[in-house]
């Protein structure tokens, strides 16, 4: 009889166990997929290289194609758009954020902002046109195409939460043949203190029509003209027609006082150069600490709230669902166990 | 005796199912802080494992230091190099205490370690991936390039430890502060 009892229960037991285990596997996998940053690709079609390099004349138009792909394991709602390009701090490629007003070369691109739902391993081809306006002078111009997930991925924990946007960006570099006018300009010096570090920066502009990669040297002197800091500097691309700043972290914070800084820059490819004589700046008593005081008085917790992120909200409920399923299986088993002895006795 | 025997037979299955449930479900909480393995065919960069210390209200500004890990991957096989930049928005307040946003300029990159190799092409001292010549440390209200690979380099997966600091203004209200960190991997002249 005991053997018969067990043999009737085994399929139920096995089924309940499988359900519970499947539920427990499904919950973490679902949350993990939802939390993974999107892996999007943006690939020029019919072009060598990872970005577009075009030579065009003023008034000319050209048809181009790009593929937006999903290389991640989950379906992604992606957004793609054309963005202005700017020179980031210390030079380099910066693509404007989504929603920024287009004002530069990106307006030459007939590339409509769109949202795409992409399955894993799938891509979408987008055809667009570049039209250089008539009357545009010779030189180097650059715009960008960007792909990003519509929904930011959460990261971090505690009362400071981070929503992460991961972007892939490619340049659309356009050269209009003609005379080159490389030019570097160095502007005013400035000082700031942040997170325990002193920074000296110079405004740097490229009013010419050629992209530059300036290198050089920055020197800081105290009020007695004694050199207190010297560093070689190497900027990445400072794009034609853009301005940025060269910013260097000093090896130690500057105390209150008057200082001066000088900067020399030279672009090797074009032999253009610029130099700024020692420009004075003042570090005030508050500036060297950036407004940070010592340890605060009577501290009270800002928040014990969990990170404001989808993962944090989903993980716990799904875990509880899995546990509840297990508990339900246990209760069902107990209920069956109570009924079956009676049935067994009646059968006897 | 029969019931005890049945319980003995049932119990291992139930306990095993419960243990499996807990073992498989609990790591979900940590899964958010693990950067996924990257698939072939594209370039990607993401931030994970952001940690910032506990925040307390204070009548003085406080520096709240933390760390995060950047993972960059180039699986295009193009050998054409890449750059990664990060940029922060303001930290928007949410809560019931009438707090104000923390400006993006209060969030700083305080250190950028040399990238570490995870898979693929080895790191080259000259070609990278490497930290730019001018240190990227500074306030993240401006985009900062934390790592770059020159042409013919960076064909692999790499991680980079980044130090960050959020300056909490004096008398900040209790609540949650949410910022948006934009990580961009790019190919450009």
Image (cartoon, rainbow, N blue to C red):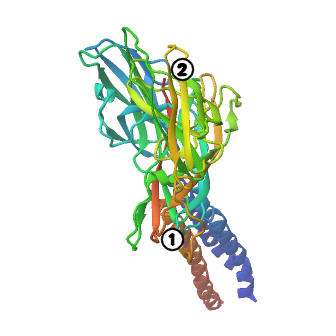
Name the chain under label 1. Answer: B
Residue A235 shows in this picture? no
| Residue at image mark 1 | B59
Q: Indicate the quadrant containing the C terminus of chain A: top left, top right, bottom left or bottom right.
A: bottom right
Extreme left residue here? A134
User: For the residue carrying disc 2, how many other residues have a C-alpha within 10 Å: few (<14), some (14-19), or many (20+)?
Assistant: many
Q: Residue at x 36, y 34 (%)?
A: A83
| Residue A266: mark | 2
Q: Residue at x 43, y 16 (%)?
A: A182
Between residues B146 and A294, which one lies in front from this camera angle?
A294
Q: Indicate the quadrant containing the N terminus of chain A: top left, top right, bottom left or bottom right.
A: bottom right
User: For the residue carrying disc 1, how many other residues have a C-alpha within 10 Å: few (<14), some (14-19), or many (20+)?
Assistant: some
Please state the horizontal and vertical placement of residue A127, each as a whole percent of the image.
Answer: 33, 26
Q: Residue at x 67, y 38 (%)?
A: B115
Task: Indicate whether B46 appears above or below A335.
Answer: above
Residue B49 shows in this picture? yes
Q: Secondary structure at mark 1?
A: loop
Asked if residue A279 lies left or right of residue A17, the reply is left
Q: Secondary structure at mark 2?
A: strand
Q: Residue at x 59, y 70 (%)?
A: A16
């Amino acid at each position: 009889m005991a053997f018969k009892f067990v043999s009737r229960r085994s399929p139920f037991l096995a089924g309940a166990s499988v359900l519970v285990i499947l539920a427990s596997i499904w919950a973490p996998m679902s949350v993990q997929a939802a939390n993974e940053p999107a892996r999007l690709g943006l690939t020029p079609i019919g072009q060598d290289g990872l970005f577009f390099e075009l030579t065009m004349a003023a008034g000319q138009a050209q048809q181009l194609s790009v593929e937006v792909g999903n290389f991640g394991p989950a379906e992604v709602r992606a957004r793609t758009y054309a963005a202005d390009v700017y020179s980031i701090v210390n030079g380099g490629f910066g693509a404007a954020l989504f929603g920024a007003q287009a004002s530069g070369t990106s307006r030459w691109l007939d590339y409509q902002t769109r949202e795409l739902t992409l399955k894993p391993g799938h891509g979408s081809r987008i055809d667009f046109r570049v039209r250089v306006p008539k009357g545009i002078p010779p030189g180097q111009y650059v715009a960008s195409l960007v792909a990003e997930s519509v929904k930011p991925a959460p990261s971090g924990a505690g009362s400071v939460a981070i929503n992460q946007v991961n972007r892939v960006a490619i340049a659309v570099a356009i050269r209009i043949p003609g005379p080159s006018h490389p030019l570097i300009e160095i502007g005013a010096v400035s000082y700031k203190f942040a997170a325990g570090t002193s920074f000296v920066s110079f405004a740097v502009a490229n009013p010419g029509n050629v992209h530059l990669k300036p290198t050089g040297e920055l020197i800081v002197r105290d009020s007695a003209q004694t050199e207190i800091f010297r560093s070689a500097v190497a900027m990445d691309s400072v794009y034609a027609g853009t301005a940025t700043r060269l910013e260097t972290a000093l090896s130690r914070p500057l105390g209150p006082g008057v200082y001066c800084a000088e900067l020399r820059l030279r672009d090797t490819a074009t032999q253009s150069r610029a130099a700024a004589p020692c420009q004075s700046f003042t570090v005030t008593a508050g500036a060297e600490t950036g407004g940070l005081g010592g340890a605060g008085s009577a501290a009270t917790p800002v928040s014990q709230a969990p990170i404001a992120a989808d993962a944090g909200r989903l993980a716990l409920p799904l875990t509880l669902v899995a546990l509840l399923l297990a508990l339900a299986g246990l209760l069902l088993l107990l209920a069956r166990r109570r009924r079956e002895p009676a049935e067994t006795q009646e059968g006897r | 005796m029969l019931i005890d025997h049945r319980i003995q037979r049932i119990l291992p299955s139930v306990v095993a199912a419960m243990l499996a449930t807990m073992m498989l479900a609990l790591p979900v909480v940590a899964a958010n802080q693990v950067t996924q393995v990257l698939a072939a065919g594209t370039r990607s960069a993401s931030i994970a494992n952001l940690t910032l210390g506990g925040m307390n209200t204070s009548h003085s500004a406080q520096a709240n230091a933390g760390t995060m890990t950047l993972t960059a991957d180039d699986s295009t096989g193009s050998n054409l190099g890449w750059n990664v930049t990060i940029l922060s928005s303001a930290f928007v307040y949410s809560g019931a205490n009438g707090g104000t946003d923390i400006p993006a300029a209060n969030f700083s990159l305080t250190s950028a370690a040399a990238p570490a190799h995870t898979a693929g092409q080895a790191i080259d001292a000259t070609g990278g991936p490497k930290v730019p010549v001018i240190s990227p440390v500074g306030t993240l209200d401006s985009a900062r390039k934390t790592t770059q690979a020159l042409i013919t380099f960076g064909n692999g997966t790499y991680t980079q430890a980044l130090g960050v600091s959020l300056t909490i203004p004096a008398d900040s209200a209790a609540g949650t502060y949410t910022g948006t960190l934009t990580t961009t991997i790019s190919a450009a002249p």
